[in-house]
Image: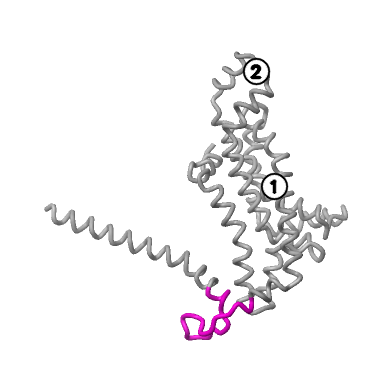
């Protein structure tokens, strides 16, 4: 075959690649663009491709709504508590999975995925039945516990991969130099594994912050977080209200993901799921 034919095929592949990337970009970005336009829309009627009148009316309405303030308060109190509690429970388990040998280690490690292997809503209903008997319904503790479920995989699998990445020879060298077990852990093991722990903490916070179904089942009517309030806004108010609230709900996630960006790019997330 002539070199010209190969050039034509190569050019077609490039064009196809560009078209495919552009189509994916439109598919992913169009809903975000539509949401941003709705957030500032006063009047937007079919068949107009953009709002005909722009306004900050709905932003003022959202910020003046008392329910929004309560939802923001509960979201920014439950999520940090869930993240801290998850770290206290899961980081020792992650270290044990990485460093210790015990019967059923593989089974228990993989079984952490069980919370994601079944329909979440059915699981929440079953847990709510137990919580009702324990008087945990509509309580802060109940919401923290139900949100904790979604953080277990992140806070165990990813740090376990981080601990795996710490060279045993470094720890042995520190012990040979006279360092005790605790000193070795805090001066050698923990600093090297810290990036993976940061990634796990960020993902755990976002999982708790964005959790809606379990909080809806367990928390109502007393505990209403931002994702739960979103359900009410979408069903009972005009589109601009839900668009404004969606942007407010997305801001913490964007900030945290930008903060953890260099750790995510470094591959700590992928390492946690390829052990």
Query: Which of the image's four quarters has the C terminus?
Result: top right
Image: 136 above or below 196: below
Residue at 64 percent of width and 36 percent of height: 107
Give the tally of numbered discs. Answer: 2
Compare marks 2 and 1 and give the one earlier in the sequence: 1
What residue lies at 54% left-to-right and 31% top-to-bottom?
165
Position in image of residue 212 (x %, y %)? 69, 61
Identify the magenta region.
37-58
Distance of label 2 from label 1 (alpha carbons)? 31 Å
Q: Nearer the viewer, residue 56 or 207?
A: 56
- Give the residue number, with chain letter if any, for mark 2: 179
Q: Is residue 40 magenta?
A: yes
Residue 266 relative to residue 155: left or right: left
Q: Secondary structure at mark 2?
A: loop
Residue to which mark 1 is pinned: 83
Q: Residues within 10 Å of mark 2 (few under 14, many from 20)?
A: some
**Left or right, residue 34 beside residue 201:** left
Residue 56 lies in the magenta stretch: yes
């Amino acid at each position: 075959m002539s070199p010209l034919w190969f050039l034509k095929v190569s050019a077609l592949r490039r064009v196809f690649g560009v078209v495919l990337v552009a189509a994916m970009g439109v598919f992913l970005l169009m809903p975000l663009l539509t949401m941003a336009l709705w957030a500032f829309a006063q009047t937007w009627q079919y068949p107009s491709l953009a709002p005909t009148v722009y306004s900050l009316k709905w932003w003022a309405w959202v910020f003046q709504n008392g329910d929004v303030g309560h939802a923001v308060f509960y979201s920014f109190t439950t999520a940090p508590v869930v993240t801290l509690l998850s770290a206290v429970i899961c980081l020792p388990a992650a270290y044990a999975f990485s460093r210790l040998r015990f019967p059923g280690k593989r089974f228990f490690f993989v079984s952490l995925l069980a919370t994601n292997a079944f329909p979440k809503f059915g699981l929440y209903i079953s847990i709510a039945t137990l919580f009702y008997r324990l008087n945990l319904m509509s309580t802060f503790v109940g919401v923290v516990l139900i949100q904790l479920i979604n953080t277990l995989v992140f806070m165990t699998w990813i740090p376990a991969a981080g601990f795996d990445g710490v060279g045993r020879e470094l720890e042995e060298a520190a012990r040979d130099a006279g360092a005790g077990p605790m000193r070795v852990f805090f001066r050698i093991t923990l600093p090297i594994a810290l990036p993976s722990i940061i990634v796990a903490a960020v993902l755990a916070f976002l999982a708790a912050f964005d959790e809606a179904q379990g909080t809806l089942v367990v928390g109502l009517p007393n505990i209403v977080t931002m994702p739960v309030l979103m359900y009410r806004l979408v069903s009972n108010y005009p589109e601009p209200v839900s668009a404004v609230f969606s942007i407010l709900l997305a801001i913490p996630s964007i900030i945290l993901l930008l903060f953890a960006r260099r750790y995510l790019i470094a591959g700590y997330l992928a390492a946690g799921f390829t052990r």
